[in-house]
Image (spheres, coloured by chain):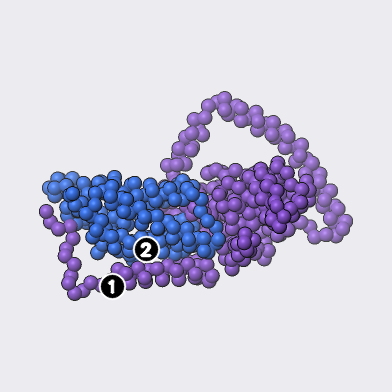
Amino acid sequence: MALSQSPPPLFKQGLPSRLRMLIAVIAAIGMLYSDLHFGMLKPLRQGLTMVLYPIEQLLILPRDAVIWFVRYASTASDIVGQRVTLERKEIENSDSLLQVEQLRIENESLRSLFDLRKSIKHKTVAAQISHETRDAFSNRIVIDRGSQHGLAPGHPVINAQGVVGQVARVSPITAEVSLVTDPSLMIPVALPRSGLRSLASGTGDGQQVELKYLNINAEVEVGDVLVTSGLDGLYPSGLPVAKINRVERAGSGQFPRITSTPVAPIGTLQHVLVILIDQELIPPAPRELDRPIPKARSEMNK
Amino acid sequence: MKRTMLGRAPTTSMITGSIAVAFVLEMLPWGGFPAPDFLALILVFWNIFQPRRVGIALAWLLGLLMDVHAGSLLGQHALAYSILSYGAIALHRRLLWYSLAGQALQLLPLFFLAKVIVVLVHLFFSGVGPTWTFFVSPLLTAALWLPMTIGILNRLNRPQSSTAAIGR
């Protein structure tokens, strides 16, 4: 049996592995800092994303085939049932659509009456969810539209049920979207029933959204729906974000713990709508900020 | 106890092929499922059996690719994998004297450490901790050590003539 490796040379050993590790560690840490603070590595990341993209898409194919097959094979009764519910929904919606149209006309005339700035109508881009990222902490999904289609970090992403999240990072043909359950994403929300305003951000378990820094005596009940307040100038106001499912009253000197579940459920191959907001309104993406949010949170916990 | 060892040196195409397969497995749309870290597994394997050919530099580069794929900060996986790789190289003389199960048990803390590094980096930069399912993955990775090692060793310890007939 031959030796599985040639004997190491006696004199020329190259760098000792401890030194190599040290170099690798220093390089990695340097990379982390420059990625976080200077953004010099954007072209590198975008280049590598483009290299990985075809492979990722190829690997998603079999899964999509299965999903497509399952959908195709759903029985006729299912489809009939779906049609019935859709028709009923359409009737319900047509009523409110008419109302919306009326309200819009009324609103416009009122605004022109007050000579107010007309509310800007933003362009939108429809996209499809392609997959979740593997980063287990940040709740992010990847969609199949990118900077070529006009997307930029900060653009809100919605679907028929409500707010899905916000674009966090773009490559030319894909974009990563931070979901509302992502702890690094904060959305200014309002409670229509009580008129309270607050900030909503993910709890980190990927399931829930919590309300931050609400008054102890805040009038909040299970079942209340959080809607965007529109105060940040990013999200159009009045979009549903989450429904409150638990309220823990706080002791003195504490904030109450209020958690809610997002209204827009996320599955693969779903369609979402990206709202292209005016570039000047967009604050920097969560990760590129100089960590003010996590700092504030850790001080709160102390 | 019989020492596990390679019958003959693996070809370069075999090493790159196995790493490519691991990378593809890693890139499957796992979503939130705590999938085993296939790339770490194959890296540790070659670090142990061929430390002079698969080293820390390769681990670092593969880590960078993983960062891009996972959408995490660049350098997060590169850091974890290079330390993982160093640990494996440091272990490689001793480890081969254990049984396969013993090897998996010895490697478990190493895989765990690699995950913890990723978690700590994330905690440090964004202040958000992981959920407990995150730590299921190293257990699965270590468990996969047995079938993978048996598979690769079987392939390499087969008599030369039969593999030649297959056309490798």
Identity of the amino acid at label 1?
Leu
| Front in this rendered view, residue A91 or B137 | B137
Instruction: Give the chain of mark 2.
Output: B
List the single residue furthest toward the right: A113
Q: On the picture, is A228 further left or further right than B10?
A: right
Label 2 CA crowd tier, 10 Å (few <14, some 14–19, many 20+): many
Instruction: Work out how far the residue at label 2 is from the one at label 1, CA to CA, in angstroms.
Output: 16 Å
Residue positioned most to the front: A252
Q: Nearer the viewer, mark 2 or mark 1?
A: 2
Chain B, colour shown: blue
> Would you identify the image quadrant in which residue B80 lies?
bottom left
Q: Which residue is mark 2?
A: B83
- Residue at x-position 43% and y-position 60%: B117
Quadrant in the rendering for residue A178: bottom right
User: Does residue A240 appear in this view?
Assistant: no
Q: Nearer the viewer, residue A40 or A33?
A: A33
Along the line of sight, the residue nearer the viewer: A237 or A210: A210
Q: In the image, is A90 to the left or to the right of B14?
A: right
Residue on which disc 1 sits: A15
Give the colour in which the image draws chain A.
Answer: purple
Horizontal relation, residue A215 to residue A38: left or right? right
**Badge 1 density bin: few <14, some 14–19, many ≥20, Cα 10 Å:** few
Name the element at disc 2. helix
Please state, as top left, top right, bottom left or bottom right, where the C terminus of chain A lies in the image.
Answer: bottom right
